[in-house]
Amino acid sequence: MIFTGKTGTGKSHLLLALALRACRAGYVVKVARCVDLLAELYAANADGSFERRLRRWARADFVVIDDVGLGQLPRDDDEPTAAHLLYNLIDLRHEKRSTAITSNLRLSEWGRYLGDATVTAAILDRLAMTSTRVEINGPSYRQHVAHQRSAKVTKKPTKKPTTVSTRRSES
């Protein structure tokens, strides 16, 4: 599955709920923000543990890659692009295991973010073959909550005028 849409529309929440259900059903699940997964793979590439870490990610029954497009990716001409690292994982999992991804970016913008449009096209090609794409449009839930909280804080309690009745007692 690929969930795309604006920030705050519930993409991550929905996929984490699916991941939790998969865990409860006994599946091995791995979840990471895209930037954290790629940082791990960059580090593994540098320290020689890339194949081992890649296989660990590839073996999971269900992988959730959250927030493709958020977070700064390292750029170094001596290292593979983020697209190359992610491609290796997606290719190993292709048609074997379930992968779900969330992104605030349109799919056409992934190449710029991941650093290689051609390799990104290969990633998207593999995902498109077996994935369902869900576009979520609507207002940000966090913005809605912030607006409600702000309205409560700025709304001054209205005091009703106190009415005092006085009666003259006639004696």
Image: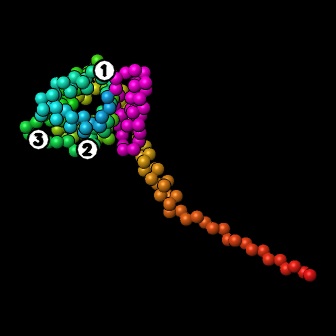
Residue placed farthest to the bottom in the image? 171
Please name the residue that numbered disc 2 is placed on.
Answer: 71
Quadrant in the rendering for residue 107: top left
| 1 and 3 marks in contact (CB < 8 Å) | no
Please name the residue that numbered disc 3 is placed on.
Answer: 76
Please name the residue that numbered disc 1 is placed on.
Answer: 97
Please rate how many residues cluster around mark 3, counting C-alpha atoms within 10 Å: few if below 14, some from 14 to 19, many from 20: few
Residue drawn at (7%, 37%), measured in percent from left and top? 78
Query: Residue 14: x percent and y percent?
Result: 41, 34
Disc 2 or 3, which lies upstream in sequence? 2
Disc 1 or 3, which lies upstream in sequence? 3
Residue placed farthest to the top in the image? 96
Please rate how many residues cluster around mark 1, counting C-alpha atoms within 10 Å: few if below 14, some from 14 to 19, many from 20: some
| Colour logic | rainbow
Q: Is residue 50 above or below residue 114?
A: above
Mark 2 to mark 1: distance in Å?
Answer: 26 Å
Q: Is residue 128 visible?
A: no
- The residue nearer to you, when weighing 23 against 6, is 23
Q: Is residue 22 above or below residue 5?
A: above
Task: Name the kind of residue labelled 1 in the image.
Answer: Arg
Magenta residues span 1-29
- The residue nearer to you, when weighing 73 against 113, is 73
Task: Name the kind of residue labelled 3 in the image.
Answer: Asp
Question: Tag 3's secondary structure?
Answer: loop
Query: Residue 50: x percent and y percent?
Result: 16, 28
Query: Residue 104: x percent and y percent?
Result: 32, 41
Q: Is residue 169 above or below residue 155?
A: below
